[in-house]
Each structure stands twice: as C-alpha cells, then as structure tokens.
Image (cartoon, grey):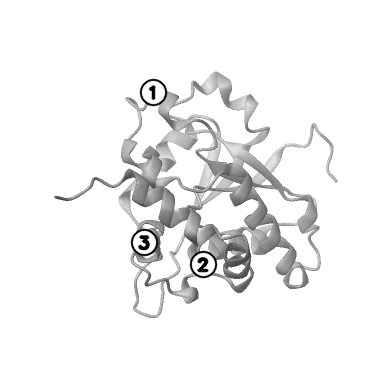
C-alpha cells in the first residue's frame, strides 16, 4: 500500500447514482493508463448532507436534489470495491486493492483551501472525465485552478447508440423497466442482493410531487 504522503496521480470522480457501464468504462480507461507506481483514486461525489450545502456557486445545482442522490456514500463505495475485485485479472500489474475510494469535493462549492481534506494530489494529477456533454467538459477550468489536468474520454454508448445516463436509469427503475445491460454484471448482482433498486425507487418517488 502506498504511504500516506504518496500523492494521487490519476483519479475518477463520479456521483454513481447508480454506477452504470459508462462509469465502469471510465475507471477501466484510467487503469489502462496507470503504472504500478501510480496512486489511483475513485472519488464519490455528494457524500455529505445535501440540504446543508450552499449551491449558489455551482454550475448545475439540480445535481444535488435529494431525488438524484438516493444511494449513500457507503453503498456506492461498496459497489465500486466489488467492481474492482471483479476486474483484478484484467490488470495483473496493478494492485487494485490499493485503489483509494474517498469522498470527493466539488471545487465550486468548497473553498480551494479545503482541497487538502479530500485530495493529496500531485501538480498535474489527471482526472478522467467523460466527454458526453457540455457540463462535463466545463469541469476543466475548475480543475486547472487546483493543479489538476483533465483527460477527456469518449463516452461509452449503449446498444441504441446513446450515452449511459444515470437520470434515465433512475427513471427506468421507477417505471419497472430496468435494463440489466446498463450495468456490469457484478454491480447488477450486488444491487439486486442489497435491494438497492428498490431503495432507488422508494427514495426517488418520495420526492416526486403527487399529481391530482
């Protein structure tokens, strides 16, 4: 295990609500680029009590709505760890058990001097980001302020030629039209065993207005 003073070289930050194939493909891209000496991190966005956050400076405050964040930090961290375990044989030169999973800050919400609470990064550390939309592409300027470089990765598409969308997947879950092909097998099985699809449905529907 790298020492505490080892600085992060490459990382992926994701909400993972839920963790779909697009997220997993992004993680694999990072792993393919990594060397055995790189400290790697998966950062889970929105681990904190959302109702207490000042979202006035954020570019997309709707991302913080309760109904868009049904899974807890612990549930998402567990799923990511199980995914890493499942792909160890694909990356024999990397110790995937050493990949750090940590809460992640949002640069436009937290003052930059608070970065050290979340990241111990090298100058020119690399964050891997999907190029699926303008919001994702807009992160580059924010990250440069804290010395982070960005590698944009072509977004993985489903059999219909569409980018994977957590928002659409949550809607499909609520409408009982879940597509298991949206998930890596280990993620789907874990979510089924932990009843997380029902958790998502319940929490999202609790926040939806009642129609009359």
At label 1, counting other C-alpha atoms closer than 10 Å, the crowd grade (few under 14, some 14-19, many 20 or more) is few
Residue 170 image label: none
At label 2, counting other C-alpha atoms closer than 10 Å, the crowd grade (few under 14, some 14-19, many 20 or more) is many
Give coordinates of residue 196: x percent, y percent.
Answer: 54, 58
Could you give the CA–CA distance between mark 2 and mark 3, rounded to whole angstroms? 19 Å
Secondary structure under the numbered disc 2 in the rendered image: helix
Q: Nearer the viewer, residue 40 or 87?
A: 87
| Earlier sequence position, callout 1 versus callout 3 | 1
Q: Do callouts 2 and 3 mark residues in contact (Cβ within 8 Å)?
A: no
Q: Nearer the viewer, residue 162 or 83?
A: 83
Could you give the CA–CA distance between mark 1 and mark 3, rounded to whole angstroms? 29 Å
Give coordinates of residue 3: x percent, y percent.
Answer: 84, 37
Q: Residue at x 64, y 69 (%)?
A: 186
Q: Residue at x 79, y 31 (%)?
A: 5
Residue underneath mark 3 = 174
Classify 54 as above or below 39.
above
Residue underneath mark 2 = 21
| Earlier sequence position, callout 2 versus callout 3 | 2
Q: Quadrant of residue 36?
A: bottom right
Q: Residue furthest bottom?
A: 159
**Residue 120 visible at all:** yes
Give coordinates of residue 49: x percent, y percent.
Answer: 49, 30
Residue underneath mark 1 = 54
Secondary structure under the numbered disc 3 in the rendered image: helix
Secondary structure under the numbered disc 1 in the rendered image: loop
At label 3, counting other C-alpha atoms closer than 10 Å, the crowd grade (few under 14, some 14-19, many 20 or more) is some
Give coordinates of residue 90: x percent, y percent.
Answer: 73, 72
Q: Would residue 93 be found to the left or right of residue 196 on screen?
A: right
Q: Marks 1 and 3: which is nearer the front?
A: 3
Q: Residue at x 74, y 63 (%)?
A: 85
Q: Marks 2 and 3: which is nearer the front?
A: 3
């Amino acid at each position: 295990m790298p020492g505490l003073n080892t600085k992060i070289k490459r990382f992926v930050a994701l909400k993972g609500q839920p963790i779909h194939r697009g997220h997993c493909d992004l993680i694999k891209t990072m792993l393919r680029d990594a060397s055995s000496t790189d400290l790697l991190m998966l950062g889970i966005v929105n681990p904190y009590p959302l109702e207490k956050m000042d979202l006035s400076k954020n570019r997309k405050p709707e991302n913080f709505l309760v109904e868009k964040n049904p899974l807890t930090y612990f549930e998402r961290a567990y799923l990511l760890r199980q995914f890493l375990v499942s792909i160890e044989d694909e990356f024999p030169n990397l110790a995937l058990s050493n990949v750090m999973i940590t809460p992640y800050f949002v640069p436009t919400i937290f003052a930059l001097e608070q970065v050290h609470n979340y990241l111990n990064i090298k100058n020119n550390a690399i964050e891997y980001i999907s190029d699926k939309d303008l919001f994702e592409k807009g992160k580059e300027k924010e990250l440069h302020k804290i010395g982070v470089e960005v590698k944009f990765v072509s977004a993985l598409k489903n059999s219909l030629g569409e980018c994977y969308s957590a928002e659409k997947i949550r809607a499909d879950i609520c409408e009982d039209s879940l597509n298991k092909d949206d998930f890596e097998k280990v993620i789907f099985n874990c979510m089924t065993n932990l009843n997380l699809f029902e958790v998502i449905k319940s929490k999202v529907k609790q926040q939806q207005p009642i129609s009359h």
